[in-house]
Image (tube, rainbow, N blue to C red):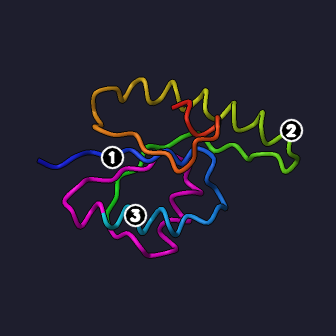
């Protein structure tokens, strides 16, 4: 039975996501369905790397994250609060929600 995996990409814009995409490709080869949670910029980044051919996407509103440390923390927190509302609507549609980090802004969802 195929699993549905939602990958939290809330604050991954501009990050090195190649290892994550390689892991997602492995899951796809095992028959799992992979969906990302993020904005359109993240989707473009994933498509430009051409590691995955077929994946789902749940869109977040585009919000640029500030470059300062404190600004990034609060911006990421705001993005995650928006994500929580969206994921609540998706409750029961995915078997696994996967995040690449145990940092607070990646585990709220």
Magenta segment, which residues?
Answer: 27-53
Residue where numbered disc 1 is placed: 5
Q: Residue at x 31, y 66 (%)?
A: 26
Give whichever of discs 3 and 1 has the lower sequence position. Answer: 1
In the depicted structure, whether residue 86 falls above or below residue 96: above
Residue where numbered disc 3 is placed: 23
Residue 88 pos. (x, y %): 42, 23
Q: Are marks 2 and 3 in contact (CB under 8 Å)?
A: no
Give whichever of discs 2 and 3 has the lower sequence position. Answer: 3
Query: For numbered disc 2, what is the local secondary structure?
Result: helix
Q: CA distance from mark 2 to mark 3?
A: 31 Å
Look at discs 2 and 3 and give the one toward the viewer. 3
Q: Are marks 2 and 1 in contact (CB under 8 Å)?
A: no
Query: For numbered disc 1, what is the local secondary structure?
Result: strand
Residue 66 pos. (x, y %): 82, 46
48 inside magenta stretch = yes
Give whichever of discs 2 and 1 has the lower sequence position. Answer: 1
Q: Are marks 3 and 1 in contact (CB under 8 Å)?
A: no
Q: Quadrant of residue 55?
A: bottom left
Residue extending furthest toward the left: 1
Q: Residue at x 64, y 56 (%)?
A: 13
Q: CA distance from mark 2 to mark 1?
A: 31 Å
Q: Quadrant of residue 60?
A: top right
Given residues 59 and 15, the one toward you in this image is 15
Residue 53 pos. (x, y %): 34, 70
Residue extending furthest toward the front: 102
103 inside magenta stretch = no
* Left or right relative to 83: residue 14: right
Query: Of the numbered discs in the image, which one, if any, rests on residue 70?
Result: 2
Look at discs 3 and 1 and give the one toward the viewer. 3
Given residues 48 and 97, the one toward you in this image is 97
């Amino acid at each position: 039975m195929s699993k549905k995996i939602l990958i939290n990409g809330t604050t991954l814009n501009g990050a090195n996501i190649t290892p994550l995409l390689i892991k997602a490709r492995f899951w796809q080869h095992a028959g799992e369905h992979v969906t990302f949670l993020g904005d359109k910029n993240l989707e473009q980044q994933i498509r430009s790397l051409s590691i995955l051919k077929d994946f789902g996407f749940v869109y977040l509103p585009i919000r640029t994250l500030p470059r300062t440390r404190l600004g990034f923390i609060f911006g990421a927190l705001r993005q995650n609060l928006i994500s929580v509302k969206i994921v609540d609507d998706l409750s029961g549609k995915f078997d696994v929600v996967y995040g690449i980090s145990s940092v607070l802004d990646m585990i709220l969802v």
